[in-house]
Image (tube, rainbow, N blue to C red):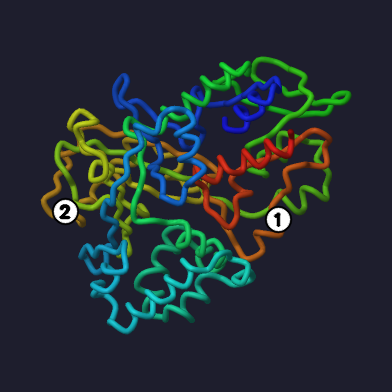
Amino acid sequence: MTLALRLAQDDHRVTVIEREPLPGGLAAGFEIEPGMWLEKFYHHLFRSDTRAVALITELGLAHRLHWSQPVTATLRDGDFHQLDSPASLLRFSPLPMTDRLRMGAALAALKAMPSARLLEGRTAATWLRRWMGPRAHAVVWEPLLRAKFGEAAEEIAMPWFWARVHDRTRSLGYLRGGFQQLYDRLASEVRAAGGETRFGSAVTAVTTEGDGLDVETDDGVEHFDRVVSTLAPRLTARLAPELPAEWRSRHDWGRAYGAQCLVLALDRPLTSVYWLNLNDPGFPFMALVEHTNYQPAADYGGRHLVYLGSYRPMDDPLMKASREALVAELVPHLARLNPEFDPSWVTDSWSFAAPFAQPIVTVDYRDHIPPFETPIPNLWVASMFQVYPHDRGQNYSIALAERLAERIG
């Protein structure tokens, strides 16, 4: 949507074709009730997300952007431990003080490091064991990496971890009323600049035709001078059969997990924490995000909203499980977090799953990132697989789009 806006503002005739019925992609929201929006997959901004903040300001939504410092904690040995600042790290009792100081020094070094260039070729697990110590790795980082990446936890590249530390701030930003306002405003501005938006239309093939490209959708075939695919490289490879074998061997590569969230509405708070990392074993979800410990429950009709978030292999049966099956599988574990919890607290629930939501960022990942231009003339690619070493995120999608808009001119 950002790319479409920039090109339309530069007098290009732009058409956005999106399979989903509304703008936003992985960041899109859903209506709890008419006019009341929440993200399908939890979202917030960091103070370092300057490109996203600039776009929000440009589109006249800065007055809706709210900043605060909600609590992030880690579950370890059945207890909640706040772990979101240097002071809370010094109080983190699961580690001896010497390990807390060592971990703090290593985190400070990563924060100060201006780029990840010196970390290329190293895995996060190896670096963390060496510089933070084996206990800090075992207690804090290994459970998080394993929960996020499963069997690939030992393979994850250290530059990816650097970005997770370097980019983050304790202060978090949220667009009151939901980020869907931003995506809807983008779509409106694209149309106001002369562009066209088509939602609920899936692209099924892209082929060369003359000096341009034919795009086949559910609605037929249409010719364009230039096409930008914002899909994962593997999906682009499926849609563009003329991409040569050499490109495919290098860029139709690697692994990715899907994202899954079960969103619960409760009639009362579950915890006092916004973001809870589950470092104790046995949970069938990676993190618990209690959105209404960050934004007021009054914004959602008094509902207390909780995300149970996971990244899973795309062939995991739970990725296709019904909402009822997910509730039955996941909700009983909430009693481990609040012994008073009763399933009757749940007044509503929603479930969402999306493929190719989390690339598996191994040490050789960088060598397989595709350039914007493909070997097919006038076919370009731009997706979150190209924001390395940063992780998926609205800010980096916006920045990537603006770089590409300058290239296309």
Please provide percent x and percent y for residue 301: 20, 28
- Up-down: is 334 above or below 58? below
- The numbered disc on residue 76 is none
Q: How crowded is mark 2: few (under 14 residues within 10 Å), some or many (20 or more)?
A: few
| Cα distance between the residues tagged 2 and 1 | 44 Å
Instruction: Evaluate whether residue 103 shows in this view.
Output: yes
Instruction: Return the residue found at the far bottom.
Output: 98
Q: Is residue 183 left or right of residue 385?
A: left
Please name the residue shown 68% across and 26% down the image: 10
Q: Mark 1 points at which residue?
A: 368
Seen from the viewer's position, the closer of residues 99 and 189 is: 189
Nearer-the-camera pick, 303 or 67: 67
Secondary structure beneath dot 1 equals helix
Does residue 158 appear left or right of residue 280 in this picture? right
Q: How many marks?
A: 2
Amino acid type of the residue tagged 1 in the rendering: His
- Please rate how many residues cluster around mark 1, counting C-alpha atoms within 10 Å: few if below 14, some from 14 to 19, many from 20: some
Quadrant of the rendering where the N terminus is positioned: top right
Q: Residue 104 location, x and y as percent?
A: 37, 74
Of marks 2 and 1, which one's residue comes earlier in the chain? 2
Q: Regarding mark 2 in the picture, which secondary structure is present there?
A: loop
- Taking the spot 37% from the left edge, 54% from the top edge, the residue there is 286
Q: Which of 278 and 290 is in front in this view?
A: 290
In the picture provided, is 143 more to the left or to the right than 26?
left
The residue that label 2 is drawn on is 338
Q: What residue type is labelled 2?
A: Asn
Residue 154 drawn above or below residue 247: below
Residue 281 visible in the current orientation: no
